[in-house]
């Protein structure tokens, strides 16, 4: 070819191509422009703590378990705890549920935490000290989460805990068969490694006055949780044998008190009720739960209810106690049957007693688990409360400047470990901006990817993994953990199942289908570059993207700048 | 593993800047074919869309030599080039005849029949966009029954079924015949690589969506191709030695309606007409399955 050109002054001797078409900038044809535009997957928005689930799955797929752990920690310092006890609202909104089965996010979180039991926090979590000091009252999930986030920003944190051991409800409330204490201890120690000081056996208002805190610290965070059992307010509540469920759990979990009666009745349908029931049954009792609404309205996690039933707990629905009967000591409970009436404020149907349906059952012991309220008598005068909780604004701050509240002791989302962690994180962000006089920046989620935006052509139906568990008979004789997590191969399989809604997984689909060869891999291997000089804007890449990580926009929007 | 993963050669011989319409299936097909065959390839292009897409003289987007030839001569020109290369001792260069449906089904049929009968050592790819798209969407013998083209307007849509080119080629007893789709680039590339490794005449029939001619959206091209496979309108299979049939992609058996609805050229069809197309697709699949069985029977004996 070279010879042919040279023999004719550089011009081809016959019709022969000497160049490609790089001068033909076909990008000028385009009136729509594809862009890489990552969106919010429903799981991230569904997780109160906002864990970046598909992103840490991507690291799991590469077997980078330590990096995956670090990524979870950014939003939640207690993955080992949450991987066991969280009610996983993320799974409820997972897009995969409409295709085959929802991704076992809960199990994967635990898997990542379990892979890192021997590891400590990465260097980047240790920030330079700012000299600002924050006191946190309560070492439960809310307090720990806030302490972690504040310490990571370089603020000095001191936590005051009224009980002998830190952990709050995780320590005193949640039974060991759900959460082995070494898991909790490990994660608390990790938080302590950031310089967080936890002072136990110190109740504010009793062992230490509030004034001392407000004098020493730049800000105070109330994270005491809801620890006071609500009374039933019916006759016979003062009989021997009628006690609070939470008190039973606390005494059993922290002081190993095992003396309970044989025939136990638990009143309530929340997680405390289930925890009491499953603990009592392990101590050899016959357990009946009395709940005033139907199973559908029961606030406990459905899996927990099913497990309790499988372990032999009897649940009587639509029934409410009206009197505890006994002569100094509890002997019988008088119950009345209920029916569901009109929905009340929270949308659940209000139970109404059925006249003449009273009946009695025998019981040696009653545990009340109809809800807990915060104990806020240590607060100084003038701090506003709302429904027995600290009334906080959007930045978790009370009307008293510098006093913040989170978790169950503040109004807002309450009740579960992950809600506590989420509000703790929120409070920490707000406290940080309060201490440093900066704008508060919470994460704002953009467009959430819906199921119909997933390109199902790229996925095939597959079964969800099943968690290993201990033998049913054996778990009832001791407090060993019931669930054992998932194997590495199962974890990899499950991470691979994830649609990764709205988050690019570098699957090359866009690059492969581009008819104009206008897409190339980014030099660092993470992502792609579109050559807009040649992209004709056909939209194939956007349309074929399996996970809606791209958007097709009008070109005009880009041309007028 | 849940998600399809592509195993595709990294090499990019075809460059940007070509003049195919946005969403053109033929340009995707060429990209995959050259990825599969590599730089030691010569391409012969008769009159067809690709005669334009490649660029005007003296430009060419394909990073390999391209020979433009007359409409009816793709197969015989490729034969000649291969003979010349062989004479020069450059037998390792694959010669690819790359023609549209017009140049294969209609105008080039005599040449391809001749080359196939002589079992010339070439790879012939027909990228089938089911009409003379380049000259303004006139019907060809590859246009499916019922489709609109400028010469088969809505009042008189095409009344004859699509010619079965694969069976015509198989009747020549050539070593390798396959169908392929731009929606399955890995399958297409595997078939091209297999064709490269086989001596003798190879024929690959690629369905190539044409957004202007099919009156479809540019971004739907791959989706439509995939539906063509899964509705049995264009099943993917390969035939070795003329009798061993293998299904490449097991169809999900979606109704043909799903395939037709994305294309304006079928918009005028009545329910009864769609039902007829459905029956034809089902029948085609049943016959194909019988052929697979027959092939298996031959292999056992």
Image (spheres, coloured by chain):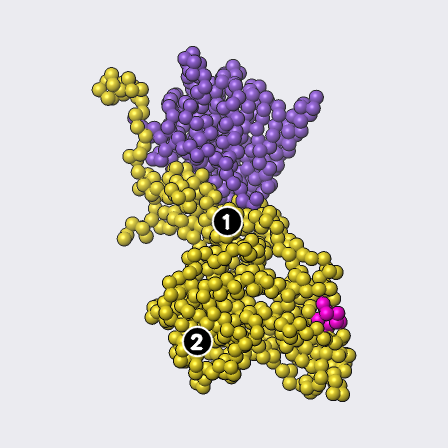
Where in the figure is residue A359, as x and y percent of width and height? 76, 80
Q: Is residue B202 above or below residue A221?
A: above
Residue that numbered label 1 is attached to: A64
Disc 1 with disc 2 on a shared chain = yes
User: Which structural element holds mark 2?
Assistant: strand
Chain letter, colour yellow in render: A
- Name which residue lies at 76% across and 75% down: A263
Which quarter of the image is occupied by the N terminus of chain B?
Answer: top right
User: Which structural element holds mark 1?
Assistant: loop
Taking the view exactly as shown, the residue that stands out farthest to the top is B87
Q: Nearest the camera: A163 or A77?
A: A163
Q: Nearest the camera: A370 or A339?
A: A370
Residue segment shown in magenta: A280-294
- Name which residue lies at 40% across and 78% down: A216
Q: Is residue A514 magenta?
A: no
Chain letter, colour purple in render: B
Residue that numbered label 2 is attached to: A220
Q: Do the residues bearing badges 1 and 2 touch, measured as CB atoms within 8 Å?
A: no
**Residue count near mark 2 (Cα–Cα under 10 Å), binned few <14, some 14–19, many ≥20:** many
The residue marked by circle 1 belongs to what chain?
Answer: A
Q: Nearest the camera: A318 or B247?
A: A318
Where in the figure is residue B68, as x and y percent of width and height? 37, 23
Is tag 1's residue or tag 2's residue first in the polypeptide sequence? 1
Where in the figure is residue B49, as x and y percent of width and height? 40, 30
Q: Is residue A287 magenta?
A: yes
Q: Is residue B172 above or below residue B35?
A: above
Where in the figure is residue B93, as x and y percent of width and height? 44, 20
The residue marked by circle 2 belongs to what chain?
Answer: A
Q: Is residue A316 above or below residue A306?
A: below
Q: Nearest the camera: A15 or B166?
A: A15
Residue B83 showing in the rendered view? no
- Name which residue lies at 27% across and 20% down: A5
């Amino acid at each position: 070819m070279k010879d042919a050109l040279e023999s004719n002054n550089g011009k081809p001797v016959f019709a022969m191509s000497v160049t490609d078409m790089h001068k033909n900038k076909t990008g000028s044809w385009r009136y729509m422009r594809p862009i890489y535009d990552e969106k919010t997957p429903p799981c991230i928005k569904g997780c109160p703590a906002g864990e970046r689930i598909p992103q840490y799955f991507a690291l799991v797929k590469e077997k980078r378990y330590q990096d995956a752990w670090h990524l979870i920690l950014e939003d939640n310092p207690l993955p080992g705890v949450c991987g066991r006890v969280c009610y996983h609202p993320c799974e409820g909104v997972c897009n995969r549920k409409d295709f085959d089965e929802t991704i076992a996010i809960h199990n994967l979180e635990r898997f990542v935490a379990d892979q890192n039991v021997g590891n400590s926090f990465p260097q980047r979590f240790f920030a330079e000290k700012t000299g600002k000091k924050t006191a946190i009252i309560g070492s439960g999930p809310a307090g720990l989460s806030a302490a972690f986030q504040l310490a990571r920003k370089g603020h000095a944190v001191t936590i005051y805990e009224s009980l002998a051991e830190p952990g709050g409800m995780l320590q005193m409330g949640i039974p060991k068969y759900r959460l082995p204490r070494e898991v909790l201890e490990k994660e608390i120690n990790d938080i302590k490694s950031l310089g967080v000081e936890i002072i136990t056996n110190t109740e504010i208002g009793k062992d230490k006055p509030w004034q001392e805190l407000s004098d020493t610290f730049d800000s105070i965070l109330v994270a005491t949780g809801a620890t006071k059992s609500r009374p039933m307010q019916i006759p016979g509540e003062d009989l021997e044998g009628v006690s609070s469920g939470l008190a039973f759990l606390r005494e059993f979990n922290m002081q190993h008190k095992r003396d309970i009666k044989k025939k136990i009745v638990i009143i309530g349908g929340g997680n405390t009720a289930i925890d009491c029931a499953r603990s009592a049954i392990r101590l050899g009792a016959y357990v009946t739960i009395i709940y005033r609404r139907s199973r559908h309205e029961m606030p406990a996690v459905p899996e927990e209810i099913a497990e309790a039933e499988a372990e032999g707990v009897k649940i009587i629905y639509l029934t409410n106690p009206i009197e505890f009967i006994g002569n100094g000591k509890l002997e019988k409970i008088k119950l009345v049957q209920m029916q569901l009436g009109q929905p009340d404020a929270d949308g659940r149907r209000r139970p109404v007693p059925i006249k003449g349906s009273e009946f009695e059952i025998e019981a040696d012991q009653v545990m009340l688990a109809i809800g807990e309220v915060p104990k806020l008598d240590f607060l100084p005068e003038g701090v506003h409360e709302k429904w027995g909780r600290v009334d906080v604004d959007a930045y978790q701050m009370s009307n008293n400047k510098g006093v913040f509240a989170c978790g169950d002791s503040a109004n807002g989302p309450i009740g579960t470990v992950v809600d506590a962690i989420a509000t703790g994180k929120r409070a920490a962000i707000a406290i940080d901006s309060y201490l440093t006089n900066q704008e508060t920046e919470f994460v704002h989620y953009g467009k959430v990817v819906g199921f119909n935006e997933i390109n199902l052509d790229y996925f095939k139906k597959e079964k969800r993994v099943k968690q290993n568990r201990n033998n049913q008979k054996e778990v009832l004789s001791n407090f060993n953990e019931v669930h054992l997590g998932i194997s590495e191969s199962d974890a990899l399989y499950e991470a691979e199942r994830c649609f990764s809604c709205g988050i690019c997984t570098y699957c090359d689909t866009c690059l492969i289908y581009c008819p104009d060869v206008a897409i190339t891999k980014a030099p660092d291997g993470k992502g792609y570059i579109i050559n807009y000089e040649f992209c004709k804007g056909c939209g194939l890449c956007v349309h074929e993207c399996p996970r809606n990580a791209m958007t097709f926009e009008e070109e005009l929007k880009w041309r007028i700048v | 593993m849940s998600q399809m993963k592509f195993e595709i050669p990294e090499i990019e011989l075809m460059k940007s800047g070509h003049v195919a319409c946005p969403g053109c299936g033929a340009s995707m097909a060429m990209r995959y074919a050259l990825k599969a065959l590599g730089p030691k390839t010569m391409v012969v292009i008769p009159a067809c869309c690709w005669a334009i897409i490649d660029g005007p003289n003296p430009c060419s987007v394909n990073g390999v030599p391209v020979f433009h030839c007359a409409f009816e001569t793709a197969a015989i020109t490729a034969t000649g080039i291969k003979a010349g290369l062989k004479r020069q001792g450059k037998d390792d260069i694959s010669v690819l005849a790359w023609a549209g449906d017009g140049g294969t089904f209609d105008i080039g049929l005599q040449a391809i029949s001749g080359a196939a009968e002589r079992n010339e050592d070439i790879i012939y790819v027909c990228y089938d966009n089911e009409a003379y798209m380049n000259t303004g969407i006139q019907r060809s013998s590859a246009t499916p029954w019922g489709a609109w083209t400028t010469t088969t307007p809505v009042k008189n849509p095409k009344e004859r079924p699509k010619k079965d080119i694969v069976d015509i080629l198989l009747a020549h007893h050539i070593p390798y015949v396959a169908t392929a789709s731009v929606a399955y680039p890995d399958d297409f590339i595997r078939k091209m690589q297999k064709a490269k490794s086989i001596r003798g005449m190879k024929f690959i029939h690629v369905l190539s969506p044409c957004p202007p001619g099919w009156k479809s959206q540019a971004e739907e091209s791959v989706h439509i191709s995939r539906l063509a496979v899964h509705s049995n309108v264009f099943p993917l299979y390969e035939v070795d030695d003329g009798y061993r049939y293998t299904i490449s992609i097991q169809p999900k058996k979606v109704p043909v309606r799903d395939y037709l609805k994305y294309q304006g050229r079928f918009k005028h069809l009545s329910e009864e007409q769609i039902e007829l197309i459905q029956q034809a697709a089902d029948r085609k699949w049943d016959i194909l399955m019988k052929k697979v069985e027959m092939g298996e029977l031959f292999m056992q004996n």
